[in-house]
């Protein structure tokens, strides 16, 4: 079966609504190929351009309104969840909040054109006390511009097909493959960028000797021990002045983290994997001076650098601050 044109002709506006709604809810299913196909079909009068635009706009506003109300009710909790689920490393909750605080209307009207921002803007608007009527106005204007632009591009190619009908047969033959490839490329691109961010964080690791020098010089450094409580039982020590927090607890308390100093994270994972992933989460939350410690706790101990003893740890109690 030729996709997406045949399915669009069969299920029409219902498919458009569901597809756009699912994408705007945050699932990694790109709506652009379907919107382009809908625009092309409107040139053949198989779909109505105004009706397709209205259906897609209704789907977008339904999803955005849901996120707006969730953001109003749960605030930072839902933002941390979106940050964790997002595959887009450029998505940053704090930058979205800062942008929204300076120019609310412009942010909402341009959000759909910026990867990641489209998903974060509605809950940020809800969490910052914006009225629903004002949100609906500016979010609706931005969504209408975004949808109109994509449908218009599809309509342009549809007009080309009208002048050269042989293109329609070619599109019908390969549309399904192109849609699948587009989805795979969309997901692969995000995963590749995510891996690139992780590699960059690993490359920016702080050497234990450099951290020791900073501590000896009295430099303010915010050190976080990310080890699991069970790892502390046989070795109840931590780096001087370090806080013991789980990655989730650290993200939950990100507003308490100072922005004017280096944030050093360490664990006992190979290649500092936990520290690197946590650093990426903190960067999305607007904390930029984050550096995993090369070699983690084991390397620091092997070098014979000073350690602070900590009280006995109850492994059943997770994410409890242990040391100062």
Image (cartoon, grey):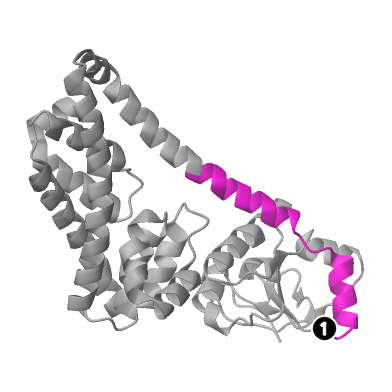
Question: Where does label 1 land, which residue?
Answer: 219
> Residue 130 at x, y = what percent?
28, 81
**In the foreground, 115 or 83:** 115
Q: Residue at x 30, y 84 (%)?
A: 129
Identify the image quadrant of residue 262: bottom right
| Horizontal relation, residue 213 to residue 73: left or right | right
Left/right placement of residue 290 relative to residue 60 reads: right
Which class describes the residues within 10 Å of circle 1: few (<14), some (14-19), or many (20+)?
Answer: few
In the rendered image, residue 208, in percent from the top left (x then y), is placed at 85, 66
- Residues in magenta, as a range: 190-218
Residue drawn at point x = 21 percent, y = 67 percent: 65
Q: Is residue 241 above or below residue 26?
A: below
Q: Is residue 316 visible?
A: no
Query: Total label count?
Result: 1
Residue at image location 28% in from the left, 52% down from the top: 146
Quadrant assignment, res 174 = top left
């Amino acid at each position: 079966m030729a996709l997406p044109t045949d399915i669009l002709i069969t299920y029409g506006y219902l498919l458009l609504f569901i597809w756009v709604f699912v994408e705007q809810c945050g699932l990694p299913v790109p709506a652009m190929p379907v919107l382009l196909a809908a625009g092309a079909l409107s040139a053949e009068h198989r779909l109505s351009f105004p009706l397709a635009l209205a259906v897609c706009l209704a789907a977008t506003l339904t999803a955005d309104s849901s996120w707006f109300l969730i953001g109003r009710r749960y605030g930072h909790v839902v933002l941390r969840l979106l940050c964790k689920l997002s595959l887009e490393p450029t998505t940053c909750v704090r930058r979205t909040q800062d942008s929204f605080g300076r120019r609310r209307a412009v942010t909402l009207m341009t959000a759909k054109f910026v990867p990641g921002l489209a998903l974060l803007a509605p809950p940020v608007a809800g969490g910052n006390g914006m009225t629903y009527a004002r949100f609906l106005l500016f979010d609706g204007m931005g969504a209408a511009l975004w949808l109109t632009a994509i449908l218009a591009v599809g309509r342009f190619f549809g007009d080309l097909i009208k002048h050269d009908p042989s293109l329609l047969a070619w599109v019908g033959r390969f549309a399904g493959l192109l849609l699948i490839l587009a989805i795979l490329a969309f997901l692969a691109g995000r995963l590749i960028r995510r891996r690139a961010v992780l590699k960059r964080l690993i490359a920016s690791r702080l050497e234990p000797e450099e951290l020791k020098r900073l501590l000896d010089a009295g430099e303010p450094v915010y050190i976080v021990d990310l080890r699991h409580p069970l790892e502390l039982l046989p070795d109840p020590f931590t780096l001087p002045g370090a806080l013991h927090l789980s990655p989730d607890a650290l993200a939950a308390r990100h507003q308490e983290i100072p922005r004017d100093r280096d944030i050093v994270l360490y664990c006992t994972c190979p290649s500092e994997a936990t520290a690197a992933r946590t650093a990426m989460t903190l960067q999305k939350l607007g904390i930029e001076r984050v550096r995993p410690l090369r070699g983690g706790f084991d390397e620091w101990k092997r070098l014979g650098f000073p350690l602070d003893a900590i009280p006995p740890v109850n492994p059943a109690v997770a994410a409890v601050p242990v040391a100062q």
